[in-house]
Amino acid sequence: MALSDVVTLGQYIPGNSLLHRLDPRTKFLAAITLTILLFFVTKLTGYIFFLVLFLAVVTASGIPLRFLLRGLRPILFLILFTFIVQALFSQEGNVILQWGFLVIRDAGLWKAFFMSFRLTLLVLVTTLLTLVTSPIDLTDGLDRLFSFLHVLRIPVHEIAMMMTIALRFIPTLLDETDTIVKAQISRGAPLDRGNIFRRLRGFVAVLIPLFVSAFRRADELAQAMESRCYRGGEGRTRMRAMVLHWTDLWTALVALALGLVTLAFNWLAVP
Amino acid sequence: MRIEAEHLTYIYGPGLPWEKRALDDVSLRIEEGEFVGLVGETGSGKSTLVQLLNGILRPTSGRVLLDGVDLTDRRKPIWKARLQVGLVFQFPESQLFAETVAEDIAFGPRNLGLSQQEVSKRVEESLLKVGLEPALFRQRSPFTLSGGEKRLVAIAGILAMWPRVLIVDEVTAGLDPRGKRDILTRIKLLHRNERATVIMISHDMDEIVSLVERVVVLKSGRICRQGQTTEVFSDEESLAGCGIRLPTIPQILSSLVKAGWRLPVSIFDVREAARLIAQEYHHGTV
């Protein structure tokens, strides 16, 4: 399997859904809202409502859920780790299982569940944003959204540009890693067999070529940009001006309302 | 080494929005010592096919047999069997990583678990095989070499593993004419002197007809045509149907034929073609 099938963050799937057509600024703010909301929700009903809300958004995006879930695979370990630590080391609640020094308490289990839920949704929301927004739109959106920071002498445009380039190159570098890994395995590199130390040693043969090519790419990109007179954001005009539509306003309002409803569900409900 | 591919199908990203059937029921048989050309348009499945033949990809369905040993059998550790098929990837110089040329070439043999002595013997020998003087190149950094030299070193790195089949994927792409000629000469010699089975992917039909005995043409993941080189390249129309154009000389001859000259089309040698054209010009009907 190709690496780019595993890591979905930073990939963009072109489409024509409502989510694809929204202004990147709206999408970005909505994603931020969802993320912040995630930290305010503390009760089961709140989580359920949040999950339903998120699934509705995913359906509207036309991105297969299966594909979105693939994005979790690389951080599965982190999620499991969070779950286990929370479940084992929480000191609150009643003991429900004890085995030697390992104690599992009911409150700890709840907490473990919610923490991993949060982490999962956090990644899913971010992944969804990049899946339905082309890197160019995303940068332009961020650029515009934070341009007010310019008065504080923060190079907003440059930061946004660096971010896009980083995002843009994730799939490229993954494909490249894939090719190099294949090439070295074809030379018998112990990348897919043997113990962990053997495998790690084999990885030097992957990392060095990867770095060499990343630097070469960076250099070529810089030259290509300079040869088109790129010199940062100053005085730069846009080919595609961003215009906020009524849909954007509606989306923002709906997002806000749903956020409040989620919070209401969270506070009003029985724990 | 005999390679048999049976009903190979390979699907990239099954179930994803960009699911792609790269190969569709391809069966192929390559005998020991053959020199086979693999051609087809971009995206016709050539690279996927050769990666299946060396076991780096597992087919979605179908199997690959190397001298009767099933490469797709999940129950057996196949990594050693797989290394008998040496695959030189596109732009293989991008896999160079060691500090010296010798170290880089030694990577493969070391992974095979060979003794230090055997490894250095193979490094010398592989450098000679690709026409690089060991004394001059052994201690240089691969990153200081020219494009053509880098590629030769990368090929040497594969040859040092003593593969019984050599597969090269667009091995001359992006090289200057001299680099191209050097590499093709080396591959021809390997085939002739070592009786190595060679499979060559190329977009350059002139390259193909000057080297290979048999051609396999792929189109959209299926075999479109296959047969002896002279035979495949004598039928312009069916070849065009596979998205392939004639090599330069047959193209010229074919144009002359259309203009009323009486000439054979499947001639690949410049001198031979020139002789026939001159003969027709002086004594012919034009």
Image (spheres, helix red, strand yellow):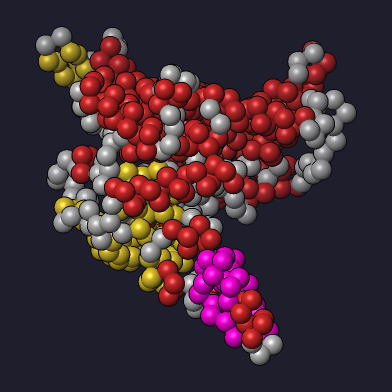
Q: Nearer the viewer, residue B247 or B124?
A: B124
Furthest residue to the right?
A: A235
Which residue lies at the image location 50% right of the left edge and 34% below the top edge? Answer: B149
Q: Is residue B249 visible?
A: yes
Q: In the rendering, at what x and y percent does residue B216 appear?
A: 40, 65
Q: Is the magenta region chiefly helix, strand or loop? A: helix
Task: Tell me where residue B5 sits by quadrant.
Answer: bottom left
Which residue lies at the image location 29% right of the left edge and 47% below the top edge? Answer: B194
Q: In the rendering, at what x and y percent does residue A262 appear?
A: 52, 34
Stretch of the chain drawn in magenta? B248-276
Furthest residue to the bottom?
A: B285
Q: Is residue B39 left or right of residue A232?
A: left
Q: Is residue A243 left or right of residue A62?
A: right
How many numbered marks are there?
0
Q: Is residue A58 visible?
A: no
Q: In the rendering, at what x and y percent does residue B8 appear?
A: 30, 61
Q: Nearer the viewer, residue B46 or B246?
A: B246
Which residue lies at the image location 21% right of the left edge and 17% below the top edge? Answer: A104
User: As displayed, is residue B157 above or below residue B61?
Assistant: above
Q: Is residue B265 magenta?
A: yes
User: As displayed, is residue A271 above or below residue B19?
Assistant: above
Q: Is residue B263 magenta?
A: yes
Q: Quadrant of the C terminus of chain B?
A: bottom right
Task: Tell me where residue A238 sits by quadrant.
Answer: top right
Task: Tell me where residue B82 sits by quadrant.
Answer: top left
Q: In the rendering, at what x and y percent does residue B278 appear?
A: 64, 76
Which residue lies at the image location 60% right of the left edge and 53% below the top edge? Answer: A15
Q: Nearer the viewer, residue B216 or B148?
A: B148
